[in-house]
Amino acid sequence: MNNTDKKDKPGLLTQMASVVSHELRNPLAIISNSVYFIKTKLAAGGAALDPKVAKHIGIIEGEVKHSNDVIEEMLAFTRPKELRCAPAAVNSAVKDLEGSYKFPPAIVFKAVTDPADPCVNADMEAVCYALRCVLDNAAQAMPEGGTVTLEASHDGKLAYLAVTDGGPGLPGGDGEKVFEPFFTTRPRGIGLGLTIARKFLEQQGGSARAENVPGGGARVTLSLPLSK
């Protein structure tokens, strides 16, 4: 038996993701730098870009971003994340995403904070990453546009961050299926976003669940234990 056969499959998957991401990131960086150089040269002297040229440059930039996003998902899925938990206000995650997350123009984003602003002991970078995965999923469920709501709330033990969209809802109403690795109903994407979101929450003693909402749409709720 050779050394490769002796390695466990999860270890091989982690190594493969690391190698592939390295080999892809370098050419993607070169493409991105070359596109920037071309834009700079074409705009020299203040001349306006030809609309068709500008369109195709935008397509290249969009595809480079999409490729880098896929690489980030692969690494987040395969690599264990070292958490740095600290006391944090739940509303801080809502406010951070309200100011930084960029939705398509057709999407209306509604952010609702918790008046009590409960506190959790969590790695808020990981929590916000998980929320971005959920928001990505919500926006992609409504290609024609609609409203996405991010709402913070709590009960006696847990703080909740719920994302609700107005899309078609969960396939078959199955709230667990969407958390399976590589499950996706979209023509593009590798189906790891919600898997990663649940992974990051469970690492912090929390959870993630999905359900259909009355009148159409889906809701994904992330929960975290309240600080004592």
Image (cartoon, rainbow, N blue to C red):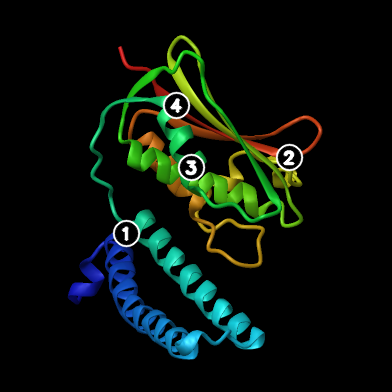
Q: Position of residue 3 (x, y in %)?
A: 18, 73
C-beta proximity under 8 Å, tags 4 and 2: no
Structural distance between the alpha carbons of marks 3 and 2: 24 Å
Q: Position of residue 190 (x, y in %)?
A: 53, 63
Q: Residue furthest left?
A: 3
Element carrying mark 1 = helix
Element carrying mark 2 = loop
Nearest to viewer (mark 4 / mark 2): 4
Dot 4 or dot 2, earlier in sequence: 4
Which residue is drawn at the image coordinates 30% and 35% (left, top)?
A: 123
Q: Residue furthest front?
A: 45
Residue at the disc numbered 2: 217
**Which amino acid, by three-letter code, is at mark 2?**
Gly
Residue at the disc numbered 4: 91
Looking at this view, is 32 or 200 the one in front?
A: 32
Element carrying mark 4 = helix
Q: Position of residue 103 (x, y in %)?
A: 59, 52
Element carrying mark 3 = helix
Residue 87 appears left or right of 198: left
Nearest to viewer (mark 4 / mark 1): 4
**Which amino acid, by three-letter code, is at mark 4?**
Asn
Nearest to viewer (mark 3 / mark 2): 3
Looking at this view, is 184 or 144 the one in front?
A: 144
Which residue is drawn at the image coordinates 61% and 57% (left, top)?
A: 184
Dot 3 or dot 2, earlier in sequence: 3
**Which amino acid, by three-letter code, is at mark 1?**
Pro
Residue at the disc numbered 1: 10
Residue at the disc numbered 3: 99
Structural distance between the alpha carbons of marks 4 and 1: 36 Å
The N terminus lies in quadrant: bottom left
